[in-house]
Image: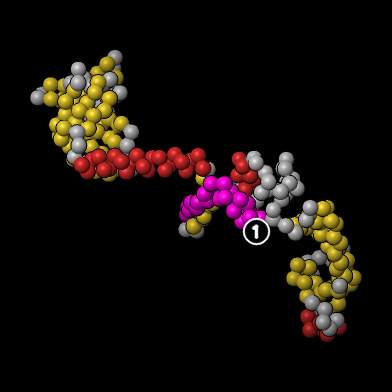
Amino acid sequence: MKVIGFTTKFYTLWDVTDETRDLGNGHKYVITHFAYIKNISFDKDKALAAYPGVPIDESLRGKTTSFQTEKEVWDNVNVFRFGKYKYDNIDNCSDTKYIAWYWDNIYNEHKDYVTKVLESRGYEIRTSSWTDYDGYVHNNEYLVSPETLAIEKAEAEKLNSDEKLLKSGATLSFLCEYNLDENGEVCNGNLTYKFPETKEMEYRGWPYWLPVINGKAKRIKNKMITINKYTYEANNYGFTVNVIDFEISK
């Protein structure tokens, strides 16, 4: 077909033809040949009048020599387009981790299809956002595996269980595996125990802290601690238990 292009001065006449190479499995290469014919006119209206009905192709700007372009075309979305399973049906592939890797390297309607395959196998697609220096917000999709989702679910259930326990005011017991930090805190799972009074100690030049009972520092590392009275509040990782009264098992 004939089309009109434009250099920096002239409107130009071209002959454009498509050549399709069928590679099988819905995979094709479309090669478009752009054959330069001649300059038509400096004036757009005169060029259109000389070739009525011939469209203007905006992509033919600044060109005066013949060339060709190649475009990969797929007529389907359900086969792998590259990699070790190329041309295999994605639904029939048992290598789900490979499909997850593949998902991260594709786009458009093909990615939409693979997304549905992964979701049917327990994956979840999430979106994270970040803002660049110009204030533009970027969104990034990422996969969450069934294994990670199971861990998240277990952690959420444990967090919910801990909150119910704290709300009940029940006595708390835990094995203290570490000394207190400079804030008088020690972590045990979702719970961070904060002791009201501490004393700084030193071992070979390294500081550590011990809780104080009746004016005396008490060693608690590797001992069972029983919390009889406390308040609590949520933090970024679970809950902070503000210790009011506690005992140390010998």
Write the start and end of the magenta stretch as one range. Answer: 107-133
Residue at 61%, 40% in the rendered image: 97
**Quadrant containing the N terminus in the rendered view:** bottom right
- The secondary structure type at the circle numbered 1 is helix
Residue 172 rendering spot, x and y as whole percentages: 22, 32
For residue 141, above or below residue 43: above
Could you say which is closer to the camera, residue 169 or residue 42?
A: 169
Name the quadrant containing residue 74: bottom right
Residue 149 rendering spot, x and y as whole percentages: 47, 43
Residue extending farthest to the left is: 214
Residue at 30%, 31% in the rendered image: 187
Residue at 19%, 26% in the rendered image: 211
| Side of 146 where 112 appears, left or right | right
Residue at 82%, 53% in the rendered image: 24
For residue 158, above or below residue 48: above
| Residue 122 within the magenta-colored segment of the rendering | yes
Residue 117 rendering spot, x and y as whole percentages: 61, 50
* Residue 193 appears in view: yes
Q: Residues within 10 Å of mark 1 (few under 14, many from 20)?
A: few
| Residue 185 within the magenta-colored segment of the rendering | no
Q: Which residue is mark 1?
A: 109
| Side of 234 where 130 appears, left or right | right
| Side of 230 where 85 appears, left or right | right
Residue 162 rendering spot, x and y as whole percentages: 29, 39
Q: Amino acid at mark 1?
A: Glu
Could you say which is closer to the camera, residue 71 or residue 225?
A: 225
| Side of 67 where 142 appears, left or right | left
